[in-house]
Amino acid sequence: MAVDHRARLPVRVSLATLVGMGLLGGCQKANPAVQRSQQAADVLTGARQSLGVSEQAVVQSQAALRTLGQSKGDLQPPFAAFVLQLEAVRKEAARQQDQGEAVLGQATWYVGARQKDISTINNDELRHTAEQRTAKMQAQTQTIKDLYGRMNNAFGVYIRNLSDLQTYLANDLNYGALNSGQRWVTEAATSGEKLRGTIRDLAVQIDLMSNTLSPVPIPTSPWPTTLRTTEPAASQP
């Protein structure tokens, strides 16, 4: 039975929408600092949704890889489907690199503007508390940066594994070559699981930071797919 892997993305109402609906105590215009926080939170929420789309591309490529590896008939259709999904993963990898730059740029801008505002607080205790929260956000930003790096590296490993299989099988598309390559089919599938795990780790951290920033609580939804570890292939004789 086919499993619906479509991500159930968080639903949220923006601050601008609440203001427009008159649900914020009659305020006609949000404070600039509040708007800045909401803008940063919106960028993070969009990035989280984007990660869900990318993870699904990996899921589809893994399904195509399994189908090809277990094929019993004409190898050309499953091979063509595998190549198509590989291209989709390449596109998602490039998109996530761009997305990561946007997220980190937004976070850096937000923290800098926040620090400037906080420096004007006269009350020492309030300023110290605000500085502590800013330090926490800086640490969260660094964690997100590190995870983007890990994810990009994992994308690279997965794409290389799939690309090697593509080249290998394209030059020898028959059952002898496919059977001989089963060890690398399994290795590629395993690298896909590692990539998916990294994507999820990053999504968790983005959820945490977006909730730290947003004036409107952001409900989070469980990730829709289940990680499955591929068993190592038996040693070749």
Image (tube, helix red, strand yellow):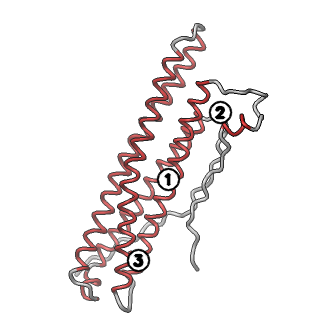
- Looking at the picture, how far across and down is residue 112, in whole percent? 45, 24
- Pointers 1 and 3 in contact (CB under 8 A)? no
Report the side of 15 relative to 190 (left or right).
right
* Image position, residue 178 (x, y; %): 29, 83
Q: Residue at x 45, y 40 (%)?
A: 103
In the rendered image, which residue does mark 1 sit on? Answer: 50
Question: CA gap, disc 2 to disc 1?
Answer: 22 Å
Crowd class of label 1 (few under 14; some 14 to 19; many from 20; radius 10 Å): some
Compared to residue 46, the image places residue 22 above or below, namely: above
In the rendered structure, which amino acid carries the disc numbered 3?
Arg
Q: Which of marks 2 and 1 is nearer the N terminus?
A: 1
- Name which residue lies at 66% across and 36% down: 16
Q: Residues within 10 Å of mark 3 (few under 14, many from 20)?
A: some
Q: Mark 2 points at which residue?
A: 215
| Tag 1: amino acid | Ser
Q: In which quarter of the image is residue 179?
A: bottom left
**Residue ID at (58%, 80%):** 1
Mark 2 vs mark 3: in front: 2
- Looking at the image, residue 133 lies above or below residue 56: above
Which structural element holds mark 1?
helix
**Percent x, y for residue 186?**
35, 72
Question: In the current view of this chain or complex, which residue is farthest to the bottom?
Answer: 73
Name the element at disc 3. Answer: helix
Closer to the N terminus: mark 1 or mark 3?
1
* Residue designated by label 3: 66
> What amino acid type should be assigned to the residue bearing mark 2?
Pro
Q: Residue 92 is drawn in which quadrant?
A: bottom left
- Is 189 placed left or right of 9 in the picture? left
Who's the residue at 38% across and 72% down the image?
Answer: 84
